[in-house]
Amino acid sequence: MLLLLPGKLLAEPAFIRDGKAGFIVSYIEYALAEDFTENGACPNGTPLNLVEIHQLSPEGKRKPGEDDKAYMDRMRAAAKALGTSPDGEDLCMNPEVAAPDPHYKTVEGSEVAVWGIDLDGENGAEDFPGLEGGEGIDNQWYRVVGCSRSYQSAGQSNGFNIAMLTGSWGILIELEGVDDIRNDEEVIVHLYANADPIRLSPSREPLAYATYSPKAEARYRATTSGRIVDGVLTSEPVDAGFQNETNSMYTERPLRQARLQMHIEEDGSMSGYLAGYTPVEAMYDTAFAFRSGIKASGELAPLRLRSGSANGAAFVLGHTCHGAYQALHANADAYPDETGNNTAISTQFRIEALPAFIVEREDALAVTAEGKQEAVQ
């Protein structure tokens, strides 16, 4: 196909077919900031896990002659007690019953520059300056985890890209009505959860021009409008949904008012931001506690797996579950409930995408208006 522009004819780029262009997200990470050791964001220190908290007490000191194993066994037993409510409830599974955790440290102030985009067109008191310039960056998720050791550049908590590359989940982007990939006043933008494992090269790199199908469920399909200006795609807000996988458990990753700001290259690759607002309860389940984690069969994962994964992660990554939960609620910045308390938190992702073919499966499920799933005939 040829694109007609004033005074010239341009060949349609290879990744556009009849005005459509598909993309597979090939890399994703939280858009945060430089490490706190570089930007000075955490003068009050970092979050502590339950063992570290107990070690601050007289009972947490090593006894004379106590060997390493005996000491750590005693510390783990004390941590388990600290992570259990007086009524015997696991505080990772029931963080709302816990007392405040003064040892969970967050980013104070709004002077630190962060990655991300302006979501609401305002420069509020809690907004950050941008690492790429600009003001009013809505990124309260960074405020919650910016002092966590596990969310620094060498930390373990921002590596969910690995599960995506192993085929556990994925994200597709599709554009329709593309007349000019450099400047187009209006295009249709689809955001889908991917139903197929990502295709990799022998060296484990994502492949361009592989074929994928979207998940059928309505919560994994979002459509909005967008525009392209000087090769930058910007989409209008739309509620979208994706999945996450940890320890063979799947959790939902809804993103309200999701939008894209992506630089489109001549070869069809894209890079930029996927941003929006994540419901606090969903963010807690995905990032910290897996309370709603399900197995591949769709059944709720065993409590032992959910609780063990949450408590184990808190110990290894250096936080308390209830401290993280309290910080999420304290810094939520959107979707107030009937009491005026915000229930969602601004969340930004840095993503990269490659050209891909997006097709509907012949055996895909159609979701009816009543929410039931029926096989497509």
Image (cartoon, helix red, strand yellow):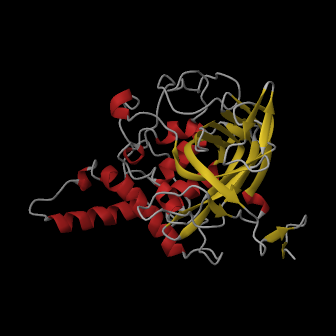
Q: Is residue 255 visible?
A: yes
Nearest the viewer among 7 and 302 is 7
**Residue furthest toward the right?**
369
Nearest the viewer among 352 and 202 is 202
Nearest the viewer among 39 and 63 is 39
- The x and y percentages for residue 228 are 72, 33
User: In the rendered view, would you say 36 is above or below 22?
Assistant: above
- The x and y percentages for residue 133 are 54, 22
Q: Quadrant of residue 332?
A: top right
User: In the rendered view, would you say 34 is above or below 58?
Assistant: above
Residue that appears at 60% across and 59% down: 170
Q: How many marks?
A: 0
**Residue furthest toward the front?**
8
Nearest the viewer among 324 and 345 is 345
Name the quadrant of the C terminus.
bottom right
Q: Is residue 142 left or right of residue 268?
A: left
- The x and y percentages for residue 99 are 50, 49
Name the quadrant of the N terminus.
top right
Q: Is residue 253 visible?
A: no
Residue that appears at 39% across and 53% down: 156
Residue that appears at 43% across and 65% down: 202
Q: Is residue 364 left or right of residue 161?
A: right
